Amino acid sequence: MSLDIDKANATVLDRMTSARPMLTTVAPARDVVPGLREGLLLHAGPPIEWPRMSGPLQGAVIGALLLEGLADDEASARAMAESGEVDFEPCHHHGAVGPMAGVISPSMAVYVVENPVHGNRSYSNLNEGYGKVLRYGAYSPEVLEKLRWMNGEMASLLAAALAATDGGLDLRALLAEALHMGDEGQDRNKAGWLLYLKLLAPQIARVAGDWATAERVLAFLGDNALSVLNPVMAACKAMADAGHGIEGSTIVTTMARNGTDFGIRVSGLGDRWFTAPAQTPDGLYFTGFTSEDANPDIGDSTITETAGIGAFAMAAAPAIVSFVSGSPKDAMHATLEMYEITAGEHPQLNIPALGFRGTPVGIDVRKVIELGVTPRVNTGIAHREAGIGQVGAGLVRPPLGIFEQALLAFAELHGLSEPETH
């Protein structure tokens, strides 16, 4: 049988865009995330071991070990990590994603997103908000105390609220509306956050055992515009995973960074990672910080671009440039450029400023290599030292070399004399 790459890619595109991610519950990670066991920590990005981890990721690991009660202090946590007493695996190996360090440990609560169209699930941890937080490597007592409250009282109320809905929250519909209101779904999520709060608040009020608990949870969600980011990331993971594993496809179904490496996976190449050193983003820095303070790019939030939003939808969100740098014209150009390296347009997620054209979706490694154009990524910038937190936001691109690796591997797998571009 001859290899029909375009047909395979069309199948991937159809599966990704027909996926309907529904946020159905919140539950302890150990109870729902496949393969997550005691002594295993999940992290953002491709596989990495302790000695090569960046400062923010090491700090998040230390915090997770303290949270789980496996270590009593920083020194004992470091000793555990260095000795091999704890295992590390990517969130992506377990159907999960996490922003920045992305660490998920067994006791943490996670969002559960179900895609009834294709029967797959995805997961993400809860967003801690701004300031000193675990995802940036902080692990002070107040950080852990907040996580315990989130994983307890808040998670229980969110689960009850979601159970009171009619089948959960339709995250694809939320994203479609947010794009029409000026979001791009990753770094600018103000509309999505308000829609999320609007949908959850009545249910929280309905099921809360007491008003004090409802007030605490609603105040936390209402003060944190990033609350919606994590379920949106899980939604994009459900979309991307629906298109993974299609033989003969050159569509990227994973992009992720661990603060050291940037990695991709391709639908037709199974679970193999292609990696290269992560780049430091270009962007705007908070007062008192410069590029010298920045850690190389980190986090699983590139799953948004993989699914066709984030930087790929910047034309819908011209105000994003006030956060990541550039001009509204640059935002428009970013989206138009991404149409050149993708297999199609999303029929449900569209951009008013482009005549309601669908967002570009389905990164094709052949087109990336043919044009020499890599995907754009919107991202927060983490301080290179654990616990200091976010120091800015900006734009980054993955190294071209990882797409070259993937295309060469594809050619070798299918016995092609030379890599086929498009």
Image (cartoon, rainbow, N blue to C red):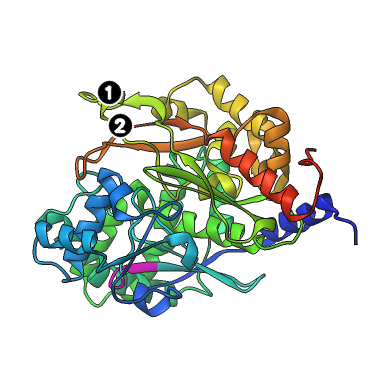
Q: Which residues are magenta?
A: 106-110
From the top left corner, tell me how far across and down residue 287 is, in percent. 23, 24
Secondary structure that dominates the magenta span: loop
Image side of residue 141 versus residue 265, left or right: left
Residues 78 and 150: in front is 78
Q: Which residue is mark 1?
A: 290
Residues 268 and 329: in front is 268
Residue type pointed to by label 2:
Ala
- Element marked by disc 2: loop
Q: CA distance from mark 1 to mark 2?
A: 7 Å
- Among the 4 quarters of the image, the one containing residue 64: bottom left
Q: Are marks 1 and 2 in contact (CB under 8 Å)?
A: yes
Q: Which mark is residue 413?
A: none
From the top left corner, tell me how far across and down residue 60 is, in percent. 25, 54
Q: Is residue 28 visible?
A: no
Mark 2 crowd level (few <14, some 14–19, many ≥20, 10 Å Cα): many
Image side of residue 360 versus residue 46, left or right: right
* Vertical side of 344 occupied by 314: above or below: above
Image side of residue 397 versus residue 420, left or right: left
Residues 336 and 342: in front is 342
From the top left corner, tell me how far across and down residue 335 is, in percent. 62, 32
Residue type pointed to by label 1:
Thr
From the top left corner, tell me how far across and down residue 21 is, in percent. 57, 64
- Among the 4 quarters of the image, the one containing residue 124: bottom left
